[in-house]
Amino acid sequence: KAGVTQTPRYLIKTRGQQVTLSCSPISGHRSVSWYQQTPGQGLQFLFEYFSETQRNKGNFPGRFSGRQFSNSRSEMNVSTLELGDSALYLCASSLGGPAGEQYFGPGTRLTVT
Amino acid sequence: EDKVVQSPLSLVVHEGDTVTLNCSYEVTNFRSLLWYKQEKKAPTFLFMLTSSGIEKKSGRLSSILDKKELFSILNITATQTGDSAIYLCARRNFGNEKLTFGTGTRLTIIP
């Protein structure tokens, strides 16, 4: 069974630009969660999608948005990039039920210059 | 509210030693606790613990949850250099998928 895949793996952007990251969950998994990992803040929850609906949202500004498609693939968008957005962006997939374990993808390393 | 505290922050031991990593959490709306291993890439799932007192085991790794004292431990016996990593614990609440992570324990195994 293929794991969670994320594209691209690395990205360099300039302040003010926008970026879209993609995540394909494990086959059969309907929930996709996004996390930001930085050395200073650790792993922080961005949002979670299930059946194309955002179910939960973390404490990030509105520049961070996402969506999920009918095949459970998810995208995350960050507009008006800031230097502080440089981070490893991880997505995790799970079945979405009450006892679901979450499995992480390899991440997208975003650098904002 | 959802705080997760891990200790120690870092640990250096010799190959063959046994280590115990700690994770404490606050009780509000707690559903389960998860352990992950992170090397230079994404966190790898180790265990999910929901019930108190039931040990989960995988090879040299084992973990247990104490819901009365609000903590979990991760034990690694006969450590190997490949165990060097950051070990993360995370809590999950009832009603949502959000994981709240601790800062992690950086484990270094010296050959």
Image: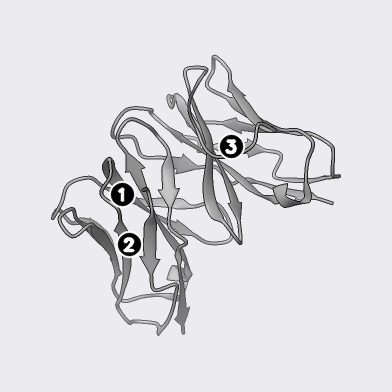
Color encoding of the figure: one colour
Which residue lies at the image location 60% right of the left edge and 32% below the top edge?
A23
Depth order, front residue of B22/B35? B22
Q: Residues within 10 Å of mark 1 (few under 14, many from 20)?
A: many
Which residue lies at the image location 29% right of the left edge and 78% below the top edge?
B18
Which residue lies at the image location 37% right of the left edge and 48% below the top edge?
B2
Question: Along the horizontal axis of the image, is A66 left or right of B108?
Answer: right
The label nearer to you, 1 versus 3, is 1
Label 1 and label 2 in one chain? yes
Q: Position of residue A104 (x, y in %)?
A: 50, 43
- Give the letter of the chain under mark 2: B
The answer to whether residue A38 is above or below residue A52 is below
The answer to whether residue B60 shows anywhere in this view is no
Question: Residue beneath label 2, please?
Answer: B23
Q: Residues within 10 Å of mark 2 (few under 14, many from 20)?
A: many
Question: Residue beneath label 1, please?
Answer: B33
What is the spatial separation of the Cα atoms under label 2 and label 3, in whole angstroms? 29 Å
Q: Amino acid at mark 3?
A: Thr
- Report which quarter residue B12 is drawn in: bottom left
Question: Residue beneath label 3, please?
Answer: A5
- Report which quarter residue B5 is drawn in: bottom left
